Image (spheres, rainbow, N blue to C red):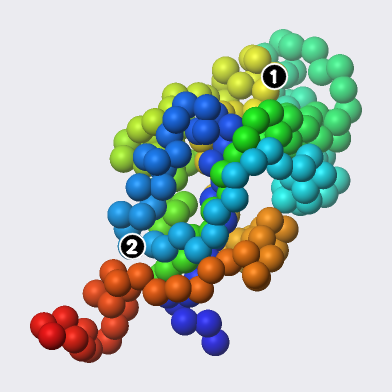
Amino acid sequence: MEHPKDERTLVIIKPDGVQRGLIGEIIKRYERTGLKMVALRFGVADEKKFWEHYNKDDAWFLKKGSKIVEDKKANGLPADKEPLEYGKDIIRQLVKFMTSGPTIFMVWEGNQAVAVVKKLTGDTEPATSDVGTIRGDLTLDSYTIAAVDDRAVRNLIHCSENVDEAKRELAIWFTDAEITEYRLVTEQILYDVNLDGILE
């Protein structure tokens, strides 16, 4: 069984985070918790890989697209596409955004890495994300303006939603050989059972 301190999660700093010069600030927020970065890659990612990353099926497209059609009708707007296509547009917009410029892919490791990163990152919509989170503090985009402008929400970061999703996403973007096994001195105070050697 994997030790809890070895849990890993994926973080992607999106093109808006790179372009706004927030790379250092974002990394600092995760580092301060005691999480350890074990892999990093910078560049413009492949469109096909992002479709694999988002991993949505027709049932998801239909559900999301039906909601969009309902919202349009409720607001007196025309719905000129089938719900399935509106659903696919969500991922099309995301993929277009994520490949519009360079991104940073990172693997973070530590106790409850997925939950810790998710908590620090904040809710998907920056405008309603809590103060103290990365999205809540560093950007102001909203679903409303993204819908008006027919684009993806610019919320600085992608992070894995749960442990199973993290494992699936990590396998898409990193090989085992690209993840570095090493020890940080701070891991002693975080994880060592007896704190042997601190006073030596």
Marking on residue 34: 2
Residue 94 visible: no
- Name which residue type carries label 2: Gly
Is 200 left, or right, of 146 in this rendering?
left
Q: CA distance from mark 1 to mark 2?
A: 38 Å
The kind of secondary structure element at disc 1 is loop
| In front: label 1 or label 2 | 2
The kind of secondary structure element at disc 2 is loop
**x 67%, y 23%: residue:** 151
**Residue 80 at x, y percent in the picture:** 86, 17
**Residue 97 at x, y percent in the picture:** 67, 30
Front one among 101 and 94: 101
**x 40%, y 41%: residue:** 24
Q: Quadrant of residue 107?
A: bottom right
Residue that carries the numbered disc 1 in the rendered image? 150
- Name which residue type carries label 1: Asp
> Quick one: label 1 or label 2, which is nearer the N terminus?
2
**x 74%, y 18%: residue:** 73
Q: Residues within 10 Å of mark 2 (few under 14, many from 20)?
A: some
Front one among 196 and 163: 196
103 vs 11: above or below: above
**Residue 50 at x, y percent in the picture:** 74, 45
